[in-house]
Image: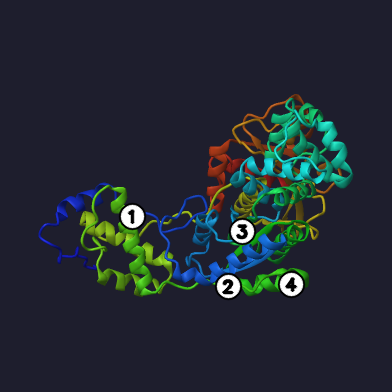
Amino acid sequence: MFEISPPSELPDSFDKNMYMDILRENPPLTRYVSRGDMRDDIDVPDPHKYADRAVFRAVRFTMKDGTPRFQPILGAAGTGKTHLYWVLKEQENYFAAGKFLAVYVPSPPSPVRIPLHLHACLVDEAGEQIFEDTVDMLIQKFGGLKGVTHEIYDYTYALERLIIDYPGISSDVVKVLLRYRLDPATRDLARRWLLGDALGEWEIDRLGVRTILEEDDVTMATLKLLTEGSEVPIVLFVDEMEGPYNTYGEDGERHFLEVIKRLYNESKNVVIIASCLLDVWDRIYKIADGPMRSRMEPPVELSLFTRDDIAIFLKETMGRYWTQQNVDAPPDELFPFDESLIDAAFTESKGVPREAIKYLIPRLDSILFDKPIVEAEPQLDYVIKLTSTVITNSIVEALAIAGASLDVEVKLQIFDEPSKKQNSSVVQLTKNGVIRQIGIDVPNVKDWDRSGGVAAFYAGKRLKTAIDDGTVQTSIIVIPESTKGAKFDALASELGTKLLTLRMNTDTGVSFVQDTSSGVLPHGFAESFRGLVDSLFE
């Protein structure tokens, strides 16, 4: 067993026992995985200095001309790609050239409704201030003053002066934004529409619009206005851009890249930072078409940790830890670690930051609790955001798990054109040369602990259309647990056994995603999936 001893060359006045008791009560260094929803407190800047330069250069140029930039960041697993987001986040109010807003975008696991995925991430991070900024931008377009309320301009007055410049789908977005500021009677409804919340049919009528924030074209029009209206550049940090490729191959990644290209072409004031595994990048680059490649800045690679970087990380970690414990730091900055442990961590990790920290955690436990070394347990390295994209992917994974035991091949059908209106996702199942299709629809829901409203009914209607025209033989809809309504109930009754309704709340939804990501059929849903797949080939 690897022998570890706390450093012994400490002054006699140092109360080692007291410090060890503090460490045992609340050990430091418990997390070795960086996540987009948990801030990283410690940063070792040298390994990402070239990435910093490239990213901040892109941000600086976009600040000057409003033109979008696309900057790929490459690195092996565990080299700090996700951590780079927190580096950017730390600088968003202190960047010398001006402020920006960094937005974390988890890898879209499926090529379905990617614009909605981007919108959810942007609004979650920016909050309602981005709505206020965009309304100001619109009002200033016809000579109005920033910050005016309904007491100065009424909704109709403003709309008449703007509607000619925003025809088609964009007109609905403009109407809702103006109501958000200038129509107190519908402000709350407008807010919910902009957040992507579920609305009832009568609520949509009150807003005077024909669409809801769900279809790709509507969502792209909304993103275009919000990024243009933001007073600071929007930096979208797309983590693991290879996600669709890993799950759905070249077609999935190509669809994702087309959405990114469309965002680049149609938006202003946005910088897209896309992290990618180094060994996958060449394949991703080859999938991109010529125009997409021409929009990419030269990729920048993250460096590995040196031995000194590991030492700096430990010293910074322990210094912060003692400050949080409200005690003076020990004379030895590394305590309770030592130089030999740094050497071992560097050798074992080969300079990969995640592996170095992962190596150190169980050794610290051995020092503190005098127990055998047990390697650190796996930690989740991804953020679960319950968008329709994420849940649709989990449904496909659940079907694949169920199908595997029945010798059924499961494959998501991917449309060539991302701007094409895709009514519902279609999954193809194949067994012994026999092919069946299942339609999947997940309404755009902001809060899974509330009713799905009219969005659930519209999702059901899309599935009914797919069944009626013969595109699919059966269907699955996922709706919030508390969804109710006579229209949806009547539709579900009409479809009968051709519609499998899965009801989830936030907790069960997160558990569902976690289980399917681990290759497990979620408890409570397993028989539904197996029975559905089996029945298609009876």
Q: CA distance from mark 3 to mark 2?
A: 15 Å
Please name the amino acid that badge 4 sits on: Ser
Element type where label 2 sits in the image: strand
Judging depth in this view, the residue of 523 and 405 nearest the camera is 523
Q: Residue furthest right?
A: 164
Please name the amino acid that badge 1 sits on: Arg
> Mark 3 sits on what residue?
238
Please tell me which of labels 1 and 4 falls first in the chain.
4
Q: CA distance from mark 1 to mark 4?
A: 44 Å
**Cβ–Cβ below 8 Å for labels 3 and 1?**
no
Point out which mark residue 294 bears: 4
> Mark 2 sits on what residue?
300
Report crowding for label 2: few under 14, some 14 to 19, many 20 or more residues within 10 A (C-alpha).
Answer: some
Report crowding for label 4: few under 14, some 14 to 19, many 20 or more residues within 10 A (C-alpha).
Answer: few
Report crowding for label 1: few under 14, some 14 to 19, many 20 or more residues within 10 A (C-alpha).
Answer: some
Query: In the rendered picture of this protein, how many numbered marks are placed on residues?
Result: 4
